[in-house]
């Protein structure tokens, strides 16, 4: 039987002030956990309301303008408040220093500042809900966003401020990874989650300023009436699209790369097998990060850009797909002749494999120029995006959350209820979003409040799926909260993993390690090292 | 030309380009289904075959296989190069307008489509074209960005406020097809739906000859009832008293209407005419100033007809003038 350590980062020091002014990366990770999950719940409520409204044509619960505000809030909250900070700021903050054998990140004060900046940006974004919620879609396309009377400024200012939070985290991680690795941890002995965070951080630092500038220009145009994007004032609306996607396409990889890193950890640990193609996975992360800057025009195949530009963007888009494909093959091959156990984190990793593969393959339809003309701005895009972002990133995030949960709190959640939740989420997700692929290719445009009768069955199917999905998340919230009080202690290393974070106690002490660990084996050397699970053989 | 009958995924394709687009769509669909099946079948097989039973089993440290890795890099690369070239070739065809195409001017605005024919005919929300003839659409917007999408023709093109954009199609079957706006444009976005009516060449010539719907032989009121739908008033104004984006037409004529700013005006013929041609001059209290002008879209007789139609929408009890 394991016992919780009497002193850990959770109870030393004590008091609310010690949390709000903490410089401990683990506590900052938890501050992010609570605030980001609140945003996730809020975005989820908007999603449920949108889908309820779409149950049948015409008015169900809300009018058209409210519907437009709800889908904008759903998108903006999920992108800027949830998914971008989710893995890096919650799990990255908590795990990164532990994984590389450091006592903290390189700049603890900057780390805390990033959380306060996140809160400030979130307040601006949420203020827009009270002040006549923005209705432009999360993309804020001009000239609509210049003309609408809703609170575009507060929301874009929020996204602008949130960008700095993202940059702070990215900067901090780059320096931490370069300077604070434990003795003996060469670049190719780093866990792959660290590689994922590293590639992500590079994009965060390089791409986010472009979004900041773009949103600032939009605000200047609205406030000062200087024509930049609005043709009525001599501006160019397509210029806005170029600027916006120059950030927002790489941003998609800010969202998925850390998730891919988690999947590499989970599949190796739960297959008890050395990861196949370590270097291929590490380099493909960097390759994706680089090429991701050169494909933004694929959002604009029907925007009126030149055929030459469309051709180049289409070509490059396909080449960002190859490294993702290589990763999938590597993960599957890792399982070959493994010793596979199917606890909740692995079930999320397998869900990721299933859903992300669909998400990636449907991207090929959209990269192909002639086919994209038909599918652009239909539900096909909505489905594709959710398969990659929710089927990909969110599944990886949940897998990571369950994987590191016993490290964060020292306690295990109910494995039985975790399996129920993962089953509900997997089924609910597919019911909700697979139907949207068919809706879209049949011609149903996105962002429609009302729709033709012919699309009703699939819409209803999708709404039904959202209830299963919602139930899954409610179950998860209940057993996770329950585990904080009643969960049995999991010990230092419940999964028998080999990375550094599992060598210290759960929850870890204030400065992570009693003694800085030394690298004695690679992160996935399951062929020659066996770390015994501290749970015993009960699984 | 190739007609496709439609499938689970695709609606029937009724333009010359649809067959090519669908062929590539289906090629990607089949190829990715095979690829997906292989990945998932292997995953399931490995999970079952190598499932941990009891204690952790020792595993091999083999972590690369150069032949395998080259294969799974090169084969997908070849496949996507095929898809890229195929998609680009068809896209070029979609971009190059045939010389003999009929040119129709398309104007998108909140929230309807207006079409101007070279013969001087104009329509709203109904694009009438001959079958088996290339049609070029020269498009622009009067306000925000819209996008012109006809699923059955597999064409889509953004409609911008500061420049012209062009698309074209050649319909292969007569019938009525949906036209959607696919770029979010505000309150009435999902109501910005029109029809493309494909007719035989002879019918097309007759239709042009008749100057679209002239309303000849109809009373003003009957003519107005038709215009109410065809000129897209229906998108925002109801005739049954229910509120929409704009006020209802029912029982409107003859009352005193309270305006934004607190003034009130009698709803008479001159007010109705002003509201059609210069809609934001005076806006009814509680509504946003979002109606576009119909200046240049409606002829005088059409305005007369719409006013006559609105006047006819009174309850028989006559609870009008106060």
Image (cartoon, coloured by chain):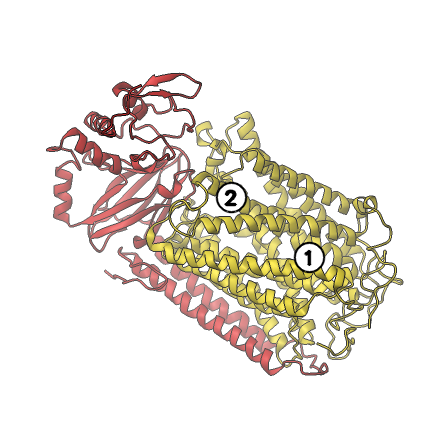
Chain colours: A yellow, B red
Residue A317 position (above or below residue B206):
below
Q: Which label is found at residue A518?
A: none
- Which residue is the extreme one toward the front? B317
**Quadrant where the C terminus of chain B lies?**
top left
- Which residue is the extreme one toward the right? A515
Q: Which of the 4 image quadrants contains residue A406?
A: bottom right
Binning the other alpha carbons within 10 Å of mark 1 as few (below 14), some (14 to 19) or many (20 upward) gives: many
Residue B61 at x, y percent in the picture: 70, 79
> SS at mark 1?
helix
Question: In the picture provided, is B33 more to the left or to the right than A23?
Answer: left
Residue A324 at x, y percent in the picture: 56, 63
What chain does mark 2 sit on?
A
Residue A360 position (above or below residue B138):
below
In the picture of the structure, the residue carrying the numbered disc 2 is: A70
**Quadrant where the N terminus of chain B lies?**
bottom left
Q: Which of the 4 image quadrants contains residue A224?
A: top right
In space, the residues marked 2 and 1 are separated at their CA atoms by 32 Å
Q: Residue at left 41%, top 28%?
A: B287
Q: Residue at left 50%, top 64%?
A: A358
> SS at mark 2?
helix
- Which residue is the extreme one toward the left? B217
Q: Which of the 4 image quadrants contains residue A199?
A: bottom right
Residue A347 at x, y percent in the picture: 61, 69
In the picture of the structure, the residue carrying the numbered disc 1 is: A197
What chain does mark 1 sit on?
A
Residue A207 at x, y percent in the picture: 62, 46
């Amino acid at each position: 039987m394991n016992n919780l350590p009497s002193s850990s980062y959770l109870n030393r020091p004590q008091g609310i002030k010690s949390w709000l002014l903490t410089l401990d990366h683990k506590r900052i990770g938890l501050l992010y956990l609570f605030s980001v999950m609140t945003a996730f719940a809020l975005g989820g409520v908007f999603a449920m309301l949108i889908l309820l409204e779409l149950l049948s044509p015409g008015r169900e619960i809300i009018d058209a303008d409210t519907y437009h505000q709800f889908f904008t809030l759903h998108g903006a909250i999920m992108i800027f408040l949830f998914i971008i900070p989710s893995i890096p700021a919650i799990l990255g903050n908590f795990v990164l220093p532990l994984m590389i054998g450091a006592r903290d990140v390189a700049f603890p004060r900057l780390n805390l500042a990033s959380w306060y900046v996140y809160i400030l940006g979130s307040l601006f974004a949420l203020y827009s809900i009270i002040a006549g919620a923005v209705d432009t879609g999360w993309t804020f396309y001009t000239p609509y966003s210049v003309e609408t009377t809703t609170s575009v400024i507060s929301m874009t200012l929020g996204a602008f401020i949130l960008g700095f939070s993202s940059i702070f985290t990215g900067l901090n991680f780059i320096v931490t990874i370069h300077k604070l690795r434990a003795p003996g941890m060469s670049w190719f002995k780093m866990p792959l989650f660290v590689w994922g965070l590293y590639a992500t951080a590079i994009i965060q630092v390089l791409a986010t300023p472009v979004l900041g500038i773009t949103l600032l220009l939009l605000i200047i145009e609205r406030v000062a009436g200087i024509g930049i994007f609005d043709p009525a004032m001599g501006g160019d609306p397509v210029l806005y699209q170029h600027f916006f996607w120059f950030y927002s396409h790489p941003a998609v990889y800010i969202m998925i790369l850390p998730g891919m890193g988690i999947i590499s950890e989970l599949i190796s640990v739960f297959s008890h097998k050395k990861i196949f193609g370590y270097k291929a996975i590490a380099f493909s992360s960097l390759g994706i990060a680089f090429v991701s800057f050169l494909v933004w025009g694929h959002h604009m195949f029907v925007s009126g850009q030149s055929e030459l530009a469309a051709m180049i963007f289409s070509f490059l888009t396909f080449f960002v797909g190859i490294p993702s494909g290589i990763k999938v093959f590597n993960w599957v091959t890792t399982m070959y002749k493994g010793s596979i156990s199917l606890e909740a984190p692995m079930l999320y990793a397998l869900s990721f494999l299933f859903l992300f593969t669909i998400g990636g393959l449907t991207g090929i339809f959209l990269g192909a120029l002639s086919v994209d003309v038909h599918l652009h701005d239909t539900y096909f895009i909505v489905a594709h995006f959710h398969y990659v972002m929710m089927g990909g990133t969110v599944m990886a995030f949940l897998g990571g959350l369950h994987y590191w949960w016993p490290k964060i709190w020292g306690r295990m959640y109910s494995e039985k209820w975790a399996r129920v939740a993962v089953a509900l989420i997997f089924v609910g997700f597919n019911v909700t979003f697979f139907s949207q692929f068919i809706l879209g290719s049949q011609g149903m445009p996105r962002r429609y409040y009302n729709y033709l009768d012919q699309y009703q069955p699939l819409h209803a199917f999708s709404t039904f799926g959202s209830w299963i999905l919602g139930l899954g998340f409610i179950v998860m919230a209940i057993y996770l909260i329950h585990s904080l009080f009643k969960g049995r202690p999991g010990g230092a290393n419940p999964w028998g993993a080999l990375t550094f974070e599992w060598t210290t106690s759960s929850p870890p002490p204030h400065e992570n390690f009693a003694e800085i660990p030394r690298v004695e084996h690679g992160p996935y050397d399951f062929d020659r090292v066996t770390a015994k699970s501290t749970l015993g053989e009960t699984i | 030309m190739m007609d496709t009958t439609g499938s689970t995924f695709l609606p029937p394709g009724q333009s010359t380009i649809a067959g090519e687009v669908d062929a590539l769509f289906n090629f990607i669909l089949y190829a990715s289904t095979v690829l997906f099946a292989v990945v998932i079948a292997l995953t399931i097989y490995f999970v079952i075959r190598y499932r941990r039973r009891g204690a952790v089993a020792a595993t091999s440290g083999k972590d690369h296989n150069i032949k395998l890795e080259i294969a799974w890099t090169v084969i997908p690369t070849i496949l996507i190069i095929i898809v890229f070239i195929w998609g680009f070739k068809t896209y070029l065809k979609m971009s190059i307008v045939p010389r003999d195409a009929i040119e129709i001017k398309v104007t998108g605005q909140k929230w309807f489509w207006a079409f101007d024919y070279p013969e001087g005919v104009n329509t709203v929300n109904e694009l009438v074209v001959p079958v088996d003839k290339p049609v070029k659409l020269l498009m622009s917007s009067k306000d925000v960005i819209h996008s012109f999408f006809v699923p059955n023709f597999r064409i889509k093109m953004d409609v911008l406020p500061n420049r012209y954009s062009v698309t074209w199609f050649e319909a292969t079957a007569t019938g009525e097809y949906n036209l959607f706006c696919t770029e979010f444009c505000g309150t009435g976005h999902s109501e910005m739906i029109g029809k493309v009516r494909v007719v035989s060449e002879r019918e097309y010539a007759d239709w042009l000859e008749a100057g679209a719907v002239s309303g000849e032989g109809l009373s003003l009121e009957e003519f107005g009832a038709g215009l109410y739908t065809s000129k897209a008033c229906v998108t925002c104004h109801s005739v049954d008293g229910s509120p929409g984006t704009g006020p209802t037409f029912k029982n409107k004529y003859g009352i005193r209407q309270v305006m934004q700013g607190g003034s009130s005006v009698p709803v008479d013929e001159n007010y109705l005419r002003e509201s059609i041609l210069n809609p934001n001059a005076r806006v009814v209290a509680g509504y946003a100033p979002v109606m576009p002008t119909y200046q240049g879209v409606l002829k005088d007789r059409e305005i007369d007809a719409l006013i006559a139609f609105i006047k006819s929408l009174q309850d028989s009890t006559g609870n009008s003038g106060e």
